[in-house]
Image (cartoon, rainbow, N blue to C red):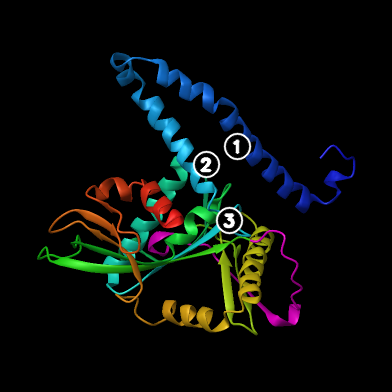
Amino acid sequence: MQSPDFWKDHERAGMLSKELNGLKEEVSFWDNFDERLGDYIKIDDEKIASKEAEIKKLKKEFGKQYVGVFLSGRYDRGNALLHVYSGAGGVDAQDWASTLLRMYQKYCEQNGLGFVILHQTFGEQDGTKSAVIEIAGRYAYGYLKGEAGVHRLVRISPFSAKGMRHTSFALVDILPEIEDVKIEIDAKDLRIDTFRSSGPGGQNVNKLETAVRVTHIPTNIAVAVQSERSQAQNKEKAMQLLKSRLAQLMEETQVKELTELRAETQGKEIEWGSQIRSYVLNPYKQVKDHRTGVESSQPEKVLGGELDEFIEAEITK
């Protein structure tokens, strides 16, 4: 980075700067770890209670370092693109998709990750039909990739006049945001549409057509972005998003699986088959991950973003 030519390649320089900052954080943690641990070992039982919050913080930091050992995939250190689709359950499912968005937003806030909604479509009662979110930060993809799958909610429906219990489903998909991808896309293979950004209830957020949808005609992959202020910025972000999806398609050569996923999210009901986690609010309270067996009797905390136990168990299983 001391080289005078370092910043000539801004894309590469930006990636290396992020990597350096992450390495500095790791070194700082381990430089001070023995000293911090030693301080707690020396104090007597009477004083240990007053240090409980500090010890919990150290334990959480150590846990993240431990989990990091398992995150060695090519894209694990980078940003993530979170997709949420409401499934079977009508207005309840759309409300459930919105609740999941808030849960992940809280998780990101608690863990120092950026959370930007790139595109969101709304249904009845301002619920979410679908949304694409950029989650930025070190190991964002590595931590969240295990959240992909169907999330099931059981509760008394707030939209039922009779107070009936209702089961709702939402699908979460996670892709890595691939910043250094070198993919040449022929302009003839693209269809670019512009439209007005909108908010809940169909309210126009912008009177100009600044939102952009880019469709890659050969694969029928479409991405839309409305988070930026100008059409040019939204187009640039949409192209980055499209390249990430195409890169995954090319690298993994899983055309069939991606086609099935696209079919599932565009029409096929999202139900029991591939559910990874259940959130039960009635007749009892429980969140259970069906892959790891991790449970919590406090769904309010889980929906408030306290996902560490579930995420770390999936990574280290």
Q: Position of residue 107 (x, y in %)?
A: 42, 47
Q: Callout 1: few (<14), some (14-19), or many (20+) C-alpha neighbours within 10 Å?
A: few
Q: What residue did someone put label 2 on?
A: 65
Q: Residue 7's image quarter?
A: top right
**The residue under label 2 is which amino acid type?**
Gln
Determine the residue located farthest toward the right in the rendered image: 4
Question: Which quarter of the figure has residue 186?
Answer: bottom right
Quadrant of the drawing holding the N terminus: top right
Q: Position of residue 79 (x, y in %)?
A: 59, 54
Residue at the disc numbered 1: 26
Q: Which residues are magenta?
A: 178-204
Residues at discs 2 and 1 in contact (Cβ within 8 Å)? yes
Residue 17: name its quadrant: top right
In the rendered view, does 152 fall on the left or right side of 137? left
Q: Is residue 208 left or right of residue 153?
A: right
Kindly identify the amino acid type of the residue bearing the numbered disc 1.
Answer: Glu
What secondary structure is marked by label 2?
A: helix
Position of residue 214 relative to residue 33, above or below, is below
Q: Is residue 203 left or right of residue 91?
A: right
Instruction: Identify the residue under disc 3.
Output: 76
> Could you tell me how far apart the alpha carbons at marks 1 and 3 are, in whole angstroms?
16 Å
